[in-house]
Image: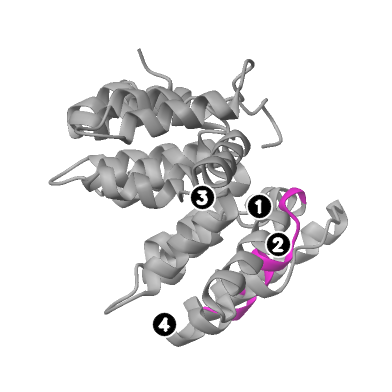
Amino acid sequence: MDFIQANPTVRPCHDFDAAADALALRTAMKGLGTDEDAIIAILTQRSNNQRQQIAKFFLEDYGRDLIKDLKSELGGKFEDVIVALMFTPCDYLAKQCHHAMAGIGTDEQALVEILCTKNNREIKEIVEAYERMYGRPLAEHICSETSGDFRRLLTLMVTEPRPLTCDRAAAHETAQGLVDAGEAKFGTDEEVFNRILTHESIPQLRLIFEEYKNICGRTIEQTLRDEMSGELLDGLLAIVECVQSPTTFFAKRLYDAMCGAGTKDSTLIRIVVSRCEIDLGNIKKEFEKLYDKTLESMVKGETSGDYKHALVALIGGP
């Protein structure tokens, strides 16, 4: 985030003791019954690095895999949240990419949310984790599960890092190229939009979007909505929205996951878990500004039980 200070809701515990936490977790899962409150209190209030240290101690001192023990003791969406917390961020998102493409059908929205919102370092880590975990390149799997311009968009995102350049004169020229590929011609050259939105640096894209509006009097979002459709539109809009305000993008995704009939639990869990140590505090504020209700209150209304308690603990609610 470039304009405001990133505000996580989960920070490292100052008086952290991996041995004490491992013992408390072992006690919470040993014998008859499970102390879910103890599990929530520990794992939602430790940084990911601290959770990895707890898992390491758990294995070395008790000879047990903490994730396996958690899976055996917990269930449902509560289990999904707690187990998600135990993976490193890149492993978790690699796992989510794999899940989005496994089985019949592909969750294009999940792929867009994960891959079209990340910087070079984050993409590199996810790509490396994916091949280590699943024995095949992420780009290869994407190519087998998607098609057309959307496939090209995603493969460009994961195979070609963005440059770090920022130049106003070049931005004007590139913006004119976007106008020529869309507004100024019959039909749309999707390849030009794909190439520019995936190949320019984030600061450069901001300049390009400004120049685009100066040239044709319309925002890049307005043009995309008129010229594109389907998954390609979703992917390009995600890039544009995250260039301009990632907190707004994720706030809207959270709202969409909970409004209407049913709750998209996988989206809700993924965003809360993956952003709680980055900028979930900012997302909470944006959520309240956009929808005149707190994220905590909506989560409480849409979830229940230990699942609700775990999410609220991560969000930082009372």
Tag 4: amino acid? Glu
Q: Magenta includes 234?
A: no
Q: Is residue 192 magenta?
A: yes
Kindly identify which residue carries mark 3. 87
Number of marks present in the image shown: 4
User: Which residue: 68% across, 75% down?
Assistant: 159
The image position of residue 42, as x and y in percent, is 45, 26
Quadrant containing the N terminus is top right
* Mark number, residue 209: 1
Which of 170 and 196 lies nearest the eye of the viewer?
A: 196
* Helix, strand or loop at mark 3: loop
Numbered mark located on residue 145 in the image: 4
Kindly identify which residue carries mark 2: 175
Q: Residues within 10 Å of mark 1 (few under 14, many from 20)?
A: many
For the C terminus, give its image quadrant: top left
Question: What colour scheme does the image use?
Answer: one colour
Give the alpha-carbon distance from disc 1 to disc 4, as whole Å.
31 Å
Which amino acid does the dot numbered 1 rest on? Answer: Phe
In this rendering, is residue 90 above or below 294?
below
Residue 141 on image: x %, y %: 50, 81
Give neighbour class at mark 2: few <14, some 14-19, many 20+ (Cα, 10 Å).
many
Q: Amino acid at mark 3?
A: Phe
Pick the front one: 201 or 190:
201
Q: Nearer the viewer, mark 3 or mark 2?
A: 3
Between the C-alphas of marks 2 and 1, the distance is 7 Å
Q: CA distance from mark 3 to mark 2?
A: 40 Å
Q: Nearer the viewer, mark 1 or mark 4?
A: 4
Answer with mark 4 or mark 3, whichever residue precedes in sequence.
3
